[in-house]
Amino acid sequence: MNINHTLTCTTCDGDADVRFGLSNRSVQPLRFPCPHCGSRIDVTLELGQGFTYDGAALIDERQPKAAFDNTNPFVDLHLDFPVWPDKYVPGNTPFMIAVSKVKAGTPEEKVVLLQRHGHRVAQLDALAESSGAIHQVIRLYHGRNKQLFVQQASSFLKEKPQTSLLGQDLNALLYRFVSSVFEPFVDMNLVRQQVDGFFRIVVELAGKDRNAFDEMMQRFEDTGFLKNLQKDCLDLYPEIFNAELALRAAFFLDVTDDQGRGVSARISTADFKSYKDLYKDIAEVFGRQLILVAAINNFQKRGKADVFLKPKDGNALSSLDKFAEKTLSERFKYLDECWYPVDGDAINSGVRNAIAHFLTEYDDLAQEITYFPEKEGIRQERGETISLIDFMRMILLLFRQLHSLHHLIKALLYYDLLIRKKE
């Protein structure tokens, strides 16, 4: 269902014709800049209650008598789909355009892909009012009262609370909780395959040289590295959940051929400033996860966690500590023929560095981010541009990598609890 309104900006008195595509979310916060002056306009639809406006007004005498005639600037809005900016065409709604963007295939295959997107969105709709509970459960996992964590997590999952407070059982409950809440954000079939693969790799490597592998695990314990890394991962999950409104459009790109850079579509809520630090933070934690990837890669190829292959354009590293001192972009060259496939579309060190050094500009009207990846002194001349939906897609893909490697942390913790410390 779609609703057409002409909204009048309370800053400049300019009119914009807006078509609202309705979602099933009980509260639907939408945002767009005034096409005339760029002022922010927030529109919230609460099902059963109607619209509220901030930055714009609905003036009865300015409402269209029939279909929009493209006299005013036109804005399409929809939470669940990207919107492609264009002039108003009756019936050419965000949903219908989205249908046309689904990957090529039979009508039945297209329906399956649309249903996949719809299922994800429906899961998010069901969780929309649970943000506080999700934050609380994750926080309680690292608290002292483990019984309270069990009670809260089990209640959320609608499970009978377990009686065991052993580390392996608390971990199992934690990962059931995380997998349940964040299922819409990932490909669960792929995650299951990766989880099985991680356990196999850990057991195989420990079987080849138990002493060397246990020595590495002892280092991780002595430094607190593995536990701290797990906590850093968990701290990001609530932030990702808080971004679900802006990520919905990025979800839809999973079922289209627009999965690279250069997508011209727009998002109907929030803006770059709301999420720019999220990408930087995920990239930081992912970079630390690569230490585990490097350790296993070195074990597989050279039998020791600290033995790196000399790269073509640098010296060989003498330890994981030296690897950890490298920048994120430098670390990849030390992962020779790596066992873990890193998604290149998720990593943009230039964007990450520009955000960290406040070298970004954002065009709200065009939803374009200009970032300056090079050090240019006081000049900012060599900027590069990506769209907001491209940026949100990068966040989604990088979170999927982080979530995947979070299960590698789980595999190592299980090895530690169930094998190394049991014998």
Image (cartoon, rainbow, N blue to C red):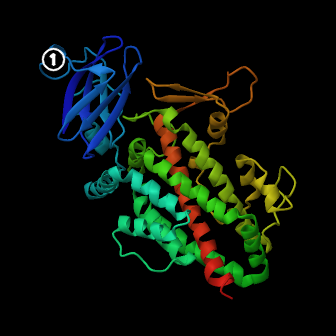
Q: Position of residue 22 (x, y in %)?
A: 24, 39
Residue nearest the viewer, comparing 132 with 16: 132
Is 352 located above or below residue 227 in the figure? above
Q: Is residue 407 left or right of residue 225?
A: left
Can the viewer see residue 91? no
Image location (x, y in percent) of residue 97: 29, 39
Residue 122 picture quarter: bottom left
Tell me if mark 1 has few (under 14), some (14-19) or many (20+) residues whose alpha carbon lies within 10 angstroms of its own: few
Rendered view: 423 above or below 249: below
Q: Quadrant of the N terminus?
A: top left
Q: Position of residue 85 (x, y in %)?
A: 36, 28
Q: Against 253, is 301 above or below?
A: below
User: Label 1, on which residue?
Assistant: 60
Residue at the far bottom: name it.
Answer: 423
Q: Is residue 372 left or right of residue 39?
A: right
- Residue 108: give x, y in percent of width and height: 26, 58
